[in-house]
Amino acid sequence: MANLEGSNLHYDANEKQQVFAALDTLFNALNPKAIPLSIEERRRYGSVDEKNKKIINKVKDYHSFEPSSSAPEVDWREFLADYEDRNFLEFVLSKLNSLVYEVESTKIVHDYNNFTDARTDYAYAKYREKMNLAGASQKSKELSQFFTKAARKKKTTANTTEQTISTTDTTTTNATTNNNTSV
């Protein structure tokens, strides 16, 4: 598990600039040949599942090793170019998806750290307000709008018991299901 409390790995201005430049370079390299599809076009064309990828691969193999068996109506130069681009873009997507996962995870850690510190500061403001220290009341009042008082709500159904607890810092939902769930 990540060290959320002691996370002190931060990007300096130079590193941020390098990331922005790399993203611009990547965008500029891919964008001229990118084909943005509408939602309707995405539905119409769909994506190739694993079974259909095998069909494409088998047809390519036959064309490579027995070109005389290939349909003359197919532009095989275009077919092979599409095939190469498919493989290239699949690799790019895989790398980007891995990167997105890592960036999202890192952001979650920084979000968690910020929110934990914000709650600590809010608790300190409330403490200062109780001590009648100057300016504490205003800060505490302004921050209190983001926090709710403790409230409990229980909901029971035939197979699920759900308990929602809203506290001064987060909302937690616990769901307990019977052992007869299917996967």
Image (cartoon, rainbow, N blue to C red):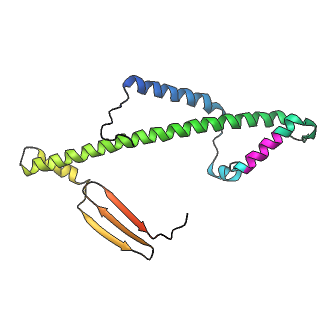
Q: Quadrant of residue 178?
A: bottom left
Q: Label the magenta part by its dominant secondary structure.
A: helix
Left or right side of 148 for 125: left
Q: Which quadrant is the N terminus positioned in?
A: top left
Residue at the far top: name it: 14
Q: Is any atom of residue 34 visible in this view?
A: no
Residue at the outermost left position: 132
Over which residues does the magenta segment extend? 51-60
Q: Is residue 159 visible?
A: yes
* Viewer-proximal residue among 127 and 55: 55
Using the rendered view, name the quadrant where residue 174 is placed: bottom left
Per the image, is 57 magenta? yes
Image quarter where the C terminus lies is bottom right
- Determine whether, in the image, residue 163 is placed left or right of residue 138: right
Give the percent coordinates (x, y) of residue 138.
14, 48
Q: Residue at x 61, y 28 (%)?
A: 29
Q: Residue at x 6, y 49 (%)?
A: 131
Foreground residue, 180 or 98?
A: 180
Residue 139: x %, y % from top left: 17, 46
| Farthest-out residue, right | 68
As drawn, 93 above or below 22: below
Instruction: Decide: is 120 above or below 31.
Output: below
Q: Is residue 2 above or below residue 32?
A: below
Residue 59 on image: x %, y %: 83, 42
Q: Residue at left 15%, top 47%?
A: 125
Q: Residue 63 lies in magenta, yes or no?
A: no
Kindly indicate the quadrant of the structure image that contains residue 37: top right
